Amino acid sequence: MSESNRSIPSSEQPKGQPKRRSAAVSRGTPTAKRSAVASAARNGSKPATATQTRRPKGARPKEQISEAELLAPLSQPIKRTKTTTLYRLGMVLVAVTFVLLVMIYLAIIAATAYGVYYHTVNHWSIINPGPGSSSKGLKGQVFLYFVPIVVGCAVVLFLIKPLFAPKAKKPVSLTLPRNKHPRLYAFVEALAVTVNAPIPRRIDVEMEPNASARLKGGLAGFLGNKLILSIGLPLVRGLSLRQLTGVLAHEFGHFSQGAGMRVTYVIRVLNHWFARVVYERDHWDEWLVHYSSHGSAISFFCVTIRGVVWVSRWILWGLMMVGHAVSGFMLRQMEFDADQYEIQIAGSKAFGETARELRLLGFAFHNAQSDLNDAWHDGRLADDLPALIMANREEIAEKPDAVEKINALMDEAKTSIFDTHPSDRERNARADEADAEGIFTLDLPATTLFADVDRLCRSATFTYYRTLLEDPMGGPRLSKDQLVDTALITREQRERADMNRALYRYFQGKLLDEFHFFLQMKEIPVPDVPKETSQEVARGRKNMQARLDKVAEASKRYGEARKQFLLASAALTLIKLKHPIRAKDFELEGTKAENARAAIAIAEEDRDRALKVMDRFTDYARMRLGNALSLLQLPALRQRLEDGDTIFERCEELVARLAKLEECWLDVDELHASNTEYYIMLACAQDQDVTQKYIAKLKAHAQSQWRLLHRIKNTLNDVPYPFTHAETDMTIGKQVLPVVPDKDDFGGIYQAADFSFSSLDTLYFRLISALAAYAEKVEGAIGLKPWEDPVDDKESKSEASSAKA
């Protein structure tokens, strides 16, 4: 039912919430492709001034705090917040607006339905098989009579079909029984009484760094006071008791807004309804698109229906945006009202600290999701997600740049008319203006309220995973054997991030976005003359550095040329099949075969020029990296390294695995390039009617991809997977391509090829990152300092502009 929250709403996350992309997507160069805050969170080493809330110094252990001491500050009710004029105005405005919007929406449906009825009853005389009328004329009359009927009925159906759509999944939560958490229930009930709010019937915990108040589902919940309180376990782990109490007071502030809570329920239902009508597409829409290009009477009906539906959806989009703007105003007033309860309970200073902590936890949550994605790539998951979120939170807080960017994000935030929550700046300003001390000032961790938090977090984490990964087709369920100690996942992620940074330093952020570099050796050679080998390492470094600017430009040209080549090649295939294309979709000057061929020739020429520069750079990189690794053959050098023998054995394994990838990489490149054209052909086949010749070409493409997949799998199927995996006997072939689909499964082959390339790409960068990190240690052992982390191009240009100003 109605829901409200204290922390950053999910709808606002994309505006200021950078997401750290996983290695499976990011091509292994973390800083180049990561947003500013997430990038800063993974770099730097100096501690930053940040809100410290985990376990306050001097706090007494939970067992030494009696329930009476906990509840003592909540013995007297606080002053009820007066409803502001803007709040009352918002209520009236929302009520009037949404009544009008619903009436307009129903009027559109009613007018369309009545139009169909009126036409059906009154215009049947259009069909007039009089004397001398031809068969063709009669067909035309029948067609004119039935077009409005069919189109009108279809439009009504499309406007009401969200009624029959399945309900969205509810957030994954775990209900806490009162008998196992009596202290929490007693505290929550006392706080509810203090805030003059109804007592919640149930307390749930969830995985997001959020707290929310909602009415229990159904008409009984809407009419009564059956309330549910949800608490995010990251808040339990990340906030102090004072801060968490303030957050809960904010939620109870919403509880006390009896009429407001019910109005917001109606707002959310109607906003969701309008959004589904305007944006939701299903198999009915796909059916219309498919049959719009059949060149028959059915095609005419489908095109007409799509046009009328498009117009009606645009009208409803306008109504929806009006509703969003008006409801946003109302919801912001409700947030300001609920903030006053938090300020009275926890104080103005704690309010501001909590706001910053919630931001930190929000970023940490998204980084933890990336960590889980990486771990799941190896068939494993962290057994305690809140602990993983806290590890990411601490990592962010240790980085001055990350904290500075988060603070700037909050301090510079502005509220738009469509926002459901005011900006942090506005909310903090009102809290400072109140200058309240707060009545709850106990210096304790929030975990004080919960029994056996670690066990609760692990149980809730498993429930969360099980629900998210549930296979609707009844496939294997997640096993607890796949859960590993969160500390292990955290350590591995830090090591992986360190290796990614080492790779980025090693190549200074150049070359690797569009190019795969191999060592061209199957094992680590023994250096003939160690001194000369060390000199070769230094010479390779020097020559790489001298060519950084040139290779950066060449790498950019190579990527652009490769993209143009793939698009033009796909366009040429479609043109040969006499399939219509749009020149701008393929970045061509025209839609003729000669336009595509000219673009291919230009792309090949640009690519070859870029490769000449890049190949010279990679020769020196190979000299540098290969010779550095060969020095590990020397026992004397290994003694200078911590765990030198282990590093040497690990490098031998990594080099052998990289050599196996190199064996099949021509096939991998061909698979990737061909899959781009294959995807374009599949997409065109869905949107338009295609010929038998087109189908034959598509089938030939699928069979070619199928053969490539088999060759790659056969090459790698017996090669041990070089990283820790849930399955101890995992091989590279099984990991990157568990099953090759049937050669006639067009969609399955595309998905398998896409997954295979993505997995191999990820594996390649993990291998080359680890080798670069170990080579960097070797260089340190022979007296060569690591290169500095490169400055991101955008940041360097910004700094240069500032300097000029």
Image: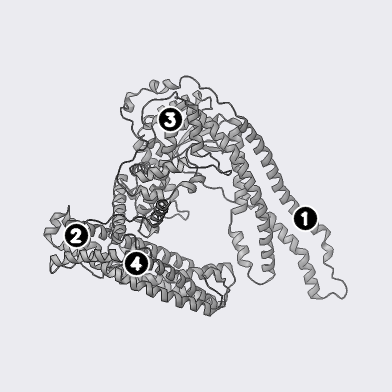
Q: Position of residue 98 (x, y in %)?
A: 66, 41
At mark 3, the secondary structure is helix
Question: What residue appears at the point 37 percent right and 60 percent down from the top-left corner?
Answer: 27
| Marks 1 & 4, CB-CB < 8 Å contact | no
The image's mark for residue 551 is 4
Q: Earlier in the sequence, mark 2 or mark 3?
A: 3
Q: Which residue is mark 2?
A: 649
Is there a contact, CB below 8 Å, between mark 2 and mark 1?
Answer: no
Instruction: Identify the element where label 4 is drawn.
Output: helix
The residue wearing badge 3 is 349
Between the C-alphas of marks 1 and 4, the distance is: 67 Å
Q: Nearer the viewer, mark 2 or mark 3?
A: 3
Q: For marks 2 and 4, give the CA distance.
A: 33 Å
Residue lying at the far left in this picture: please name it: 636
**Given the image, on which type of amino acid does mark 3 rest?**
Lys
The disc labelled 1 sits on which kind of residue?
Gly
Q: Which residue is mark 1?
A: 115
Residue mark closest to the camera, 2 vs 4 = 4
Question: Foreground mark, 1 or 3?
Answer: 3
